[in-house]
Amino acid sequence: MKRKEGKDVLSELLDLRHRPRRPVTDPETRRLVALASGHVPSDGSQLLKMVLEASKIAIEMGLLWEGLALIRRADNVAPDSAHREILFKIRAQERNAWHLLAEMDRALGIVAGVFRAAPGDAPPPLTWYAMRVNLEAQAGRMREAARHLEELASDSRAQSSTDLDIVSAHFCWLTGETEKGLARSDCALTMSEGAASFTYYWAPRLGLLLQAGREEEAAALVAELEAKDQRLLGRSTRRNPAGYALARARIALARRDLGGMQEEVMAVLRSEVARPLERNMALLLLAQHALCARSVRAARMALGRLGTYGKAFWAQPVWARLALLEGDAEAAARRMEPLVDPHFPMLAPETLRWAHEVSAYGAARLLARAAEVRASRGQPGRPARVSVAQPSPDPNAAGAPRSLLVGVSPAIRAVHERIAQYAAQRANLLITGETGTGKEVVARLLHERGPWVSAPLVPVNCGALSGFLIESELFGHVRGAFSGAIRAHDGVFIAAGEGTVLLDEIHALSPDMQVKLLRVLEDGEVRPVGGTAVRRSHARVIAMMNEEPERLIEAGLLREDLFYRLERLRIHLPPLRERKEDILPLLRHFLARFYQEFEVGLDPEFVRALCAHDWPGNVRELKNEVERIALTAGDATVLSRDMLRTFGEHRITPGHAASPAPPAPPPAERTSRLTTEDRRDWLLELFGENRRLTRKKVTRLLDCAGNTAARDLAALEERGLIRRVITSGSLRTSFYERC
């Protein structure tokens, strides 16, 4: 296909903005975003315009990581006065992306960076002051929001505009100061048209009217705005139908019309053009509908689908209501504790205004208990509390990845940047790292965040197959190619289509198979076993290795030309012992799988012991340890150091990490005149260094016959030291791992 020029891509993006809303799964729009990702116009102004339009479309459709990757390209353009206005708009889109990911600190960091970069004689527009106030309030930092509101009031530009009144009305709506907010809203006389004005201008007034019990005025306001949009834009190109449906759902909730509320919310969730933020708000309202109807299961399902948005400050009252309905008053109080602020006494009560399932007495008791929790927070000797009831991102939510790479270390942040940079690339890629570091998670994120997410991801464990089985699995076979081939088989390269083929332990392939794989990577041509016709493969290949490629090349286990063919794009995952700041976030993440209905306390000695251990099995070992503790802890609400198991001869204790096993001598020194027991002891040491081994690999490492390796593996399995895992019943393939 002829490569498009940057001007052509930009003109298509601008044309797309003036079309009616398109579904978030629209392939043409996704193709255009991917096309913009591959263009780097030489002109700085043209690049910034392309980044702005493409990132705006990507973020609106829920392609948040693609939008952030596009925005990073704007960092290379010098921020001169000619580009200042468009750079402000690009940073606003970046703020929107982090807001949708519920990363409020990152969003506030973008705003703070704009204020730092702005020269003294040219401060940011007033909308950035308003943005800072709203973000602080939505993050639950009301005092900081009030301070920024005072700064905005002292700006001479704000005193002659409606922005100050609008932001003040929004702040009063959030804090429950209804009368003051309505007075401020009445002062904002000049309003613009369209969906943006509904969100920015009218949404606070709608909320204030509902707080004041003026549902009829609120309904009349929504009807008037919707009719105005229809007159100005035409019925087929209405900008914000989901916004009006959500407003009507809130009015129905205030009237206790649960049937009408459910109808409006489901209309948004069924809509193909509803944006991620609108879907999140609809899910939050759906959870409130289920709570009012006292349906615990439906409420938990709706909150679970919120993904990262479920961590937002304003979602916590809904979680508290769910816990209260389940009979866990303590968990409900801990959820409400951040909202109990003596400086804003109406903040917490207003969040329970629509809790029709809670009596006035029950709401008062909940707030009183939350105030006690807030007062007792931080007392010495109390175990640290770790919130584990936050849901993982919903696989079915628009734009939400099905995989999650947890960590806060600089190394993990660099991996996230690489994922955002490489996800839209068709080039083959290599992922290296020790066993258990999360290589498959990274591979799945690369697939899920790319434009080909609808195509399949096909994983293949190269170490679990051998001979013609792996060749048939990769390239397919024709009917009658070998005994048992009663029908033709496509193979993973053809079955993946335009998706991704994930090759694990690629160095376990035989040299001749590596040559055949190299031909596929270079030419994209696949020849099935027993066939003569060549087929084309369009799949991207992601290869993974748990050993250093250079050492494998020296040992003759990996072809050098295959390595260089894969190494053009490379991501390395460091072991957990080199990024111990990730242990606590990983601990929270794994605990959330088992403690979904309450919070669990962590003894400080327990945390120190975990951080002191070297974790030779990396993240997988930590995950297994957390699962074991969760399954054996019973009803314990505080996890202590005594629950940790022993590792070899050493127990996990503070300041004493498990000592790694000494490296085994090379095979050449130990393969001659070994007794059976010595050989099996050596094999057990190999399992300490390699979590999984196939019989083929054991044969090569021990330099023995295949039948000998099979007998040794069977003996260790009978003694309960290792176990066999069947990977394919039809192909009779398996591997062994240590118990």
Image: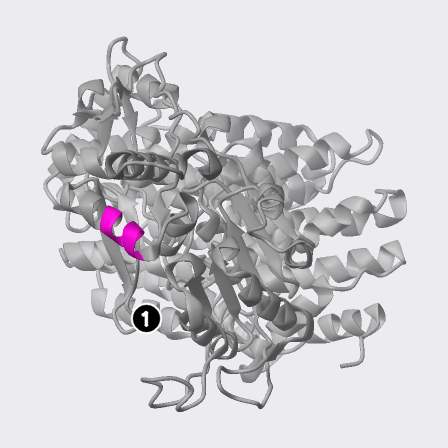
Q: Image check: 50 left or right of 330?
A: right
Q: Start and end of the magenta stretch? A: 707-712
- Amino acid tagged 1: Met
Residue 702 lies in the magenta stretch: no
Residue 55, horizontal then vertical, whole percent:
66, 59
**What residue sits right under mark 1 in the picture?**
266
Q: Is residue 382 above or below residue 362?
A: above
Of all residues, the one furthest to the top in this rendering is 380
Q: How many marks?
A: 1
Residue 709 colored magenta? yes
The answer to which of 267 and 220 lies nearer the viewer is 267
Residue at figure coordinates x 40%, y 39% from the top left: 671
Q: Please name the colour scheme applied to the rendered image.
A: one colour
Q: Residue at x 82, y 29 (%)?
A: 120
Answer with left or right where residue 577 lies relative to residue 66: left
Considering depth in this image, is 542 or 135 the residue closer to the camera?
542
Main SS of residues in magenta:
helix
Whether residue 217 is visible: no
Q: Is residue 650 above or below residue 539?
A: above
Circle 1 SS class: helix
Residue 410 in view: yes
- Identify whether 101 is placed above or below 675: below
Placement of the N terminus among the 4 image quadrants: bottom right
Position in image of residue 175 (x %, y %): 40, 36
Classify the position of the C terminus by image quarter.
top left
